[in-house]
Amino acid sequence: MLEIIGILGGGAMGRGIAQVALQNNKSVIVYDVMPNAAEIIIKHLTVTFDLLIGKAKITNDQKNEYLANLKIVDSMQKLADCDLIIEAIIEDLQLKKTVFEGLSKVLKSSAIVCSNTSSFSITAIASAYKDPSRCLGLHFFNPAPVMPLVEIIPAYQTDPLLVEQLKAEMTQWKKTPVVAKDTPGFIVNRIARPFYSEALRIYEENLATKEDIDLAMRQIGGFKMGPFELMDFIGHDVNFSVTNSVWQATFYDPKYKPSLSQQKLVEAGFLGRKSNRGFYTYGADSNVQNLESTPMEKLKPIFDRIITVLINEAYDALYWQLADPEDIELAMTKGVNYPKGLLAWGKEIGLENIKSRMDALHNAYKEERYRCSQYLSRYSG
Ligand code: NAI
């Protein structure tokens, strides 16, 4: 039984994961290097639990019980009794490896040691731990208490039994676990790239306005937000850095090449909603318009192009066996709220249609970026 959960890093993700574990009646120990960590983390969680009491989601007794099960510690040594460790410190590979090396001297041999990294190789992080067979990726989505998906990523060295054990544990935590190969971006952050990159490309080529691109994806696709609204919401620093890291980690596969216009926003500090300006402006000078008047015949080709490249990417993930088909569908619906699984969506549109649209893009641009997945080339006929 995994009873004592150790969390390294009490930032946005670490706190969220701590909340999930506490609400599943676990004992949670958090270690963070920031000054006043205990005060800050306990305050955050208290405010969150009070909000949940206000919404009648938990009782006051439950809040007290959760807080009694929470310990904030000031040294890694105090994680010695943990059964499951989830590392959620800042995204810095060298620092993560140093932490895993440090944990080697502290943890019992039966501990399971996970990283919540979004972009680094789990195999590389695991290599720093005394027994890499005990290490995995356990990738939650933000905000962790709200988003059901968790990607479980065995490292090259991981004992396969641990994958099953962690899957069962996450199901108990009422999460939706999917298993992903240790490849750049895992499932969600890889397959979702074209949602942003194709939108940016259409915008940079001046084929449509950002408003029309957003509208097309919302109105025809049923996505909750269009790509530009969503990038502004996520933050361009975060979104650009994920794209950049997937691109670099795939040895610069042109499919994932970052966009210059997004880089400019990052350079300018126009990071999206959090800085009141991104592609749109927010606050008093808001220029967010919800014009719903663009004719369908103008929106349809925009939607067709973006959904085609997305579906091609999902089938490519299937071709390279990055995950089971059911997990690919779950990942996109439960991790980023897509209205439908992309594999099923592809079948609805017709795989031959997706293939011929990809071939048309490839013919028009003569760019590697638009290569049709081998899956579609082989099996769509
Ligand atoms: P954050 O910056 O909010 O929190 C990081 C925390 O780690 C800070 O409180 C910092 O004081 C602490 N820290 C730094 N070095 C430490 C060390 N050596 N030992 C213990 N604590 C240390 O970052 P955030 O957003 O919570 O991200 C954490 C991890 O989760 C990163 O690997 C990130 O890539 C990943 N992630 C982030 C998501 C997001 O949307 N923010 C989504 C999924 C994964």
Image (cartoon, rainbow, N blue to C red):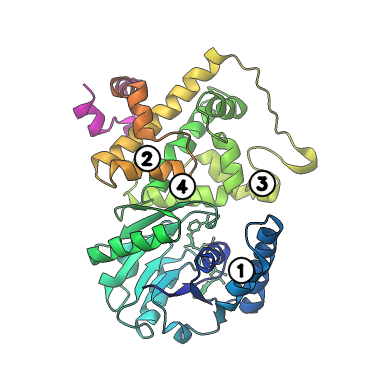
- Quarter holding the N terminus? bottom left
The amino acid marked with disc number 2 is: Glu
Kind of element beneath mark 3: helix
Q: Position of residue 224 (x, y in %)?
A: 56, 35
Which residue is disc 1 drawn over? 62
Which callout, 1 or 2, points at the residue further toward the start of the chain? 1
Q: Which mark is residue 150?
A: none
Q: Nearer the viewer, mark 1 or mark 3?
A: 1
Q: Position of residue 205 (x, y in %)?
A: 51, 26
Disc 2 or disc 3, which is closer to the eye?
Answer: 2
Q: Which mark identifies residue 329?
A: 2
Relative to 108, residue 7 above or below: above
Q: CA distance from mark 1 to mark 3?
A: 34 Å
Q: First in sequence: mark 1 or mark 4? A: 1
Type of residue at label 4? Gly
Identify the residue at horizontal 32%, vertical 69% (top origin): 135
Using the numbered discs, state the Cα–Cα distance from disc 1 to disc 2 in whole angstroms: 35 Å
| Disc 2: CA contacts within 10 A as few (<14), some (14-19) or many (>=20) | many
Q: Which residue is mark 3?
A: 273
Question: Residue 256: x percent and y percent?
Answer: 39, 42
Query: Mark 1: which secondary structure?
Result: helix
Residue under label 4: 335
Which residue occupies the foreground of this view, 146 or 92?
Answer: 146
**Main SS of residues in magenta:** helix
For the residue marked with disc 1, what is the amino acid?
Answer: Gln
Q: Amino acid at mark 3?
A: Arg
Q: Residue at x 39, y 31 (%)?
A: 309
Is residue 361 on the magenta stretch? yes
Label whose residue precedes the other's in the sequence (2 or 3): 3
Sequence-earlier tag: 4 or 3: 3
